[in-house]
Structures are given as structure tokens and as C-alpha cells.
Amino acid sequence: MNYREYLKRLLTAVFLILLLISLWYLRYILMLGFTAAMVAVALSVPAGWLQQKGLGRGSANIIAVVGFFGVTILLGFAIFPTVIEEASNLFASLPTALLQAAESYELWRLSSDNLRVVLPALNYSEVRAALEALGIQAGDISNIVMPLVNSTLPVLQGVGSVVFGLIANIAIIIFVSIFFLVEPATYVKASLMLVPHHYQARALEIWDELYRTMTNWVSAQIISISITVFLVWFILGVLLGMSHSLTVALFAGVATFIPNLGSIIPLIPIVIFTAADDPAKLLIIVPAYLLIQLLESNVLTPYIVKLELDIPAGGLLLFQVVAATALGALGVLLSIPLLALVITLVREIYSYDILRLNERGLLFFTDRTGGLRVHRGHEEREGVTEENGRSSATPTTPTTTHPTV
């Protein structure tokens, strides 16, 4: 290796290291851009459908943008005011509910000699005296709420700055996503300027594959949200009679965007609405909702993601942990499409274009001891033969074959 070649490789390595360091420090800004791109892809689905119906591109984009954000605002007005109102009613009736619970407990304890021996006595008048000593009157919770609010004002001021930053980030995402939606070809053309001329056609194919992957993720999210909304509304509202079931169902559907924690957050409005209406129903409604989320989170959604994006559930969970550590909340929120993009790029560029695995294929099978064996071409291994790129087992050796992408 001559001096010029050595210097060229050294400068290339230094450039790549500096590039990686820069990307690491700019990762949060890049995640905002990625979020905007995902919003643009989601908006392009209804916009493309409207264009197929005969509308112009500009009109279809405007209708898609206005419709998307209009529905988002309407959902916000439908969900949060109801939750706040019911929470206020619950707090207002809390002292009376505590007194009634104490009275019901004492009557239940006295109904059986065994319970009278096992359970401690709770005097109804003592509970009333304790509430009055704390300055709590039945139907009046302001004596607790106002001191609590006053004591948390410094914390709320800090939260206000966080909320302001969140609103600013959302505004950036909205505007950038609209720019992506209006002229996507401009950004694709700019990317083609960075690849050799002979690879530009293949780069366009990769762009198409990335877009197909993202639209598949949008489809998976829509299916998952629809199933969650229907199950929560039908089981909790229609069958179990929970109040404001449609509001809770919409809240649970929106919360599915948040991996893992999205299944727990809807418990807040469920507890508020049920406790304000009939606290005894909590013993039925909360377990029913947890069963719904157990089915949706561990069976339906992984199956839909596997069907639409071909992402293994175990790998997705590990990637979510990595994304949460490196990229924060946005990394967790967009971990599925981010992992899908990584898989697509590695498959298309490295596996197909460099290793050429799409041309010769790769098959493996399980032998008699349960170990994995790889075989290529026309050969026979452990009683398993492969013909024309497909494997088949001989009658004497039962095996299981697994095609690998």
C-alpha cells in the first residue's frame, strides 16, 4: 500500500467517525425529521386515494391535511373535557364516597361472626370525625385541592416550559411534514445526487420499497387502532355497561401509538369514569380491560406487525429498549417503523446488492438432534434434499425447513 492510498483510507475513516459523532449529537433533530416524514407518509395514504378518485394532487393534499388535523382536534375535544369533568365530579363526591364505603364495610363485617372476629372494626362516626378534622366536608374537596395546587405551582411552572417545548416540536413536525407531502420528489432527487449514476435506478427501487414499508406500518396501526376501539367499546360499554365507553375506546385507540405504556394509560379514564358512576364495577371492568390489552398487545398487534412488516416480536422488544435509551420518547414511539426501515435498508443494500442472497437463496433445516443446518445448491444433508431452490425431506427422515429472506 502506497502513501496516497494509506492517506485516502485514513481520511475516509476520520470522515466516517466525525459523521457518526455528528449524527449522534443531532439524533433528536433527526428524529423530529423522521417523525415528520412518517406523518407525511400517513397523510399521503388518503391523499393518494383521493387522487385515484379524480382529484388533483393539490386538492387531495389539502383535504388530507385538513381532515387529519381536524379529526385530531375533534378527538381531543371529545376525550379530554369529558375526562376532566368526570374527574372533578369524582373529587367532589370523594368525601361522601369514603363515608359510604366505611358504612358499607362495617355493615358487611357485622353480617358474619367469622368476619367480625377476623376484620378490624371501623366506626362510621370516627371516619366522619377524621374527615372533619382534616377540614373535609361531604361534597367539598376544595380544602384539599387548593393547598395541593398552591404547593405544586413551582413544579407546574417547570412543566409549563416542557409543554411549551413540546408544542414547538409538534409545530415543527407539522410544517415539515406538509413540505414533505407537497414535494416529495424534490427530496428523492436530492438523494439521487449522492449515488453513482449506474446505481440511481436501484436507488429508486429502494425508495419505493421504503415507502411501501412505511405505508404497511400505517396500515398496521390503523388495523390495530380499529380493533382496540371496537373491543373496548363493545366489551366495556355494551356488555359491562361502563359509562363514557366510546370516549375511553377512542382514548385507548390513540394510546396504542405508544408501545408498552399505551396499554396502561387508558386505565386512568377507566378508573375515573367507573369510580364516579359505580365503584363496585371496578372489580369487573379493570380486569376485563387488562384482558383486552393482553389479547391486543401480545397476540393481535404482534401478528399484524409480523404480517405487514415481517418483524419478529422479540427483536422489536429489544430494539425498543435500545431506542428508548438512545433516542428518548420519540425513539420508543417510532421504534416499529424505525426498525422496519433498518431491516429494509440492510436487506436491500447489504443482503441483496452486496451478498446477492436474492439470486442464489439460502435455506436451512432442523436435523434429528434439533440443530440447524444450512445447505445450498443441489445437495443432500441428513436425509434432506434441495431441488430448484426448494427443500424436501426424504420419507426416512422427518425434518422441518425454514426459508430465510
Image (spheres, helix red, strand yellow):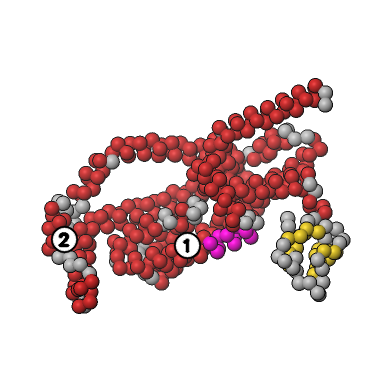
What number is the disc on residue 293? 1
Q: At label 2, which amino acid type do we have?
A: Val
Q: Position of residue 300 (x, y in %)?
A: 55, 63
Q: Position of residue 295 (x, y in %)?
A: 51, 65
- Whether residue 301 is in magenta: the answer is yes
What number is the disc on residue 127? 2
Dot 1: what SS?
helix
Q: Tell me which residue sits at (81%, 74%) in the image.
A: 396
Q: At label 1, which amino acid type do we have?
A: Gln
Q: Is residue 245 in view?
A: yes
Left or right placement of residue 5 versus residue 116 in this view:
right
Residue at the right extreme of this rendering: 378
Q: Which residues are magenta?
A: 298-308
Tell me the crowding category of disc 2: few under 14, some 14 to 19, or many 20 or more residues within 10 angstroms, Cα based. Answer: some
Q: Is residue 42 in view?
A: no
Q: Tell me which residue sits at (65%, 56%) in the image.
A: 310
